[in-house]
Structures are given as C-alpha cells and as structure tokens.
Amino acid sequence: MIHKQQLGFSDKDIIRGLCDALVRNYLSNVAKGKNIKPKIFFQGGVAANIGMKASFEKALGTEVYVPEHYDMMGAVGAAILAKEQVQKTGVSRFKGFNIADSNFTSKSFECSGCSNRCEVINICNLQNIIGCFGDRCGKWSSKLA
C-alpha cells in the first residue's frame, strides 16, 4: 500500500485494491472448490464495508445481499446449532450468564502429538481449563465437557 501511495495512487484506489485482494484471498482459500450460486448473502461485521460488498459483486459477477441483521446472523446460527445439539443429546454445556463476570486467562502450548504441531490455546477460569482451540485434529478440544 505504501508503494502504491508513493506511485501516486489515490486512497480510494488503494482501498479498492485492498478489498479486491481480500476477496481473492477468501475465494481462493475459504471458498476453494465450492460452487457459489446466487442468491448470495454476506454476513458478519465485514459486511458493513461497502467496498468489500462491491469487490465480492465484481468477483462473483452477481449481486451480493447484506441482510438487515448481518452482524447478528452468526450468533443466531450458533444458538440454533446449540439448541439442536441439546435436543439431540439432552445435555447442555451452558455455563450460565454469570460467566461474563469471571476472570479468564489463556495459555498456549505447541502439541507434539502429531505432525501438525498445532499451537493449542487453553482458556482457563481460575486453574480450570474450560475451553481450547487451535488443535486441528481435535485431540484437546474433544476432551472438554
């Protein structure tokens, strides 16, 4: 971006280029091998960025829709999945609303259990590990209740 500024490109053109690059990265990595067909909905916080919407539309050659509650759809989807899981298993891992008042720490380590050598992040409440992420094989996260 600095090089483009030095060459005299406008801020508008630089930002458009950044949005285009992010869209290309998404389509070639996250969406790789997936058939994306209209009607396309763009959700999450980034959907508020009109430049990203325009770049997706240009790359996909079709209109991209940003729903009214684009910033809450992920939370609603997670709640639906949690509800379905509880209905299926009869077990909830809900920790209660007061958990927001707790103090959490995180600690990481590199797992040498396989060739992935993942950096595993443990989320702790006091000395208890209550969650983790980063283990691609599920070795650590599958042990938590």
Image: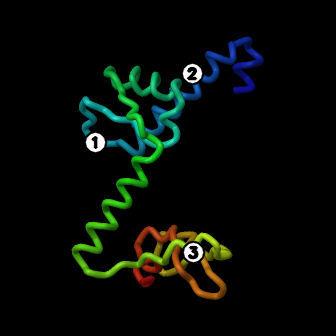
Q: Sequence-wise, which precedes: disc 3 or disc 1?
A: 1
Label 1: which secondary element: loop
Marks 3 and 1: which is nearer the front?
3
- Cα distance between the residues tagged 3 and 2: 41 Å
Q: Quadrant of the N terminus?
A: top right
Is residue 42 in view?
Answer: yes
Q: Are marks 2 and 1 in contact (CB under 8 Å)?
A: no
Vertical arrangement, residue 142 with respect to residue 49, above or below:
below
Q: Which mark is residue 16?
A: 2
Outermost residue, right side: 6
Foreground residue, 77 or 118? Answer: 77
Q: Which mark is residue 107?
A: none
Vertical arrangement, residue 121 with respect to residue 60, above or below:
below
Q: Position of residue 105 (x, y in %)?
A: 67, 75
Q: Please state which amino acid type lies under the numbered disc 3.
A: Ile
Residue pointed to by mark 1: 34
Quarter assignment of residue 77: bottom left
Label 2: which secondary element: helix
- Dot 3 crowding, Cα within 10 Å, few <14, some 14–19, many 20+: few
Q: How many marks?
A: 3
- Dot 1 crowding, Cα within 10 Å, few <14, some 14–19, many 20+: few
Q: Is residue 86 left or right of residue 106?
A: left
Q: Which mark is residue 99?
A: 3
Q: Please state which amino acid type lies under the numbered disc 1.
A: Lys
Residue at (43% x, 76% y) in the render: 94
Residue at (37% x, 61% y) in the render: 79
Label 3: which secondary element: helix
Q: Quadrant of the C terminus?
A: bottom left
Q: Sequence-wise, which precedes: disc 2 or disc 1?
A: 2
Foreground residue, 70 or 131? Answer: 70
Foreground residue, 86 or 138? Answer: 86
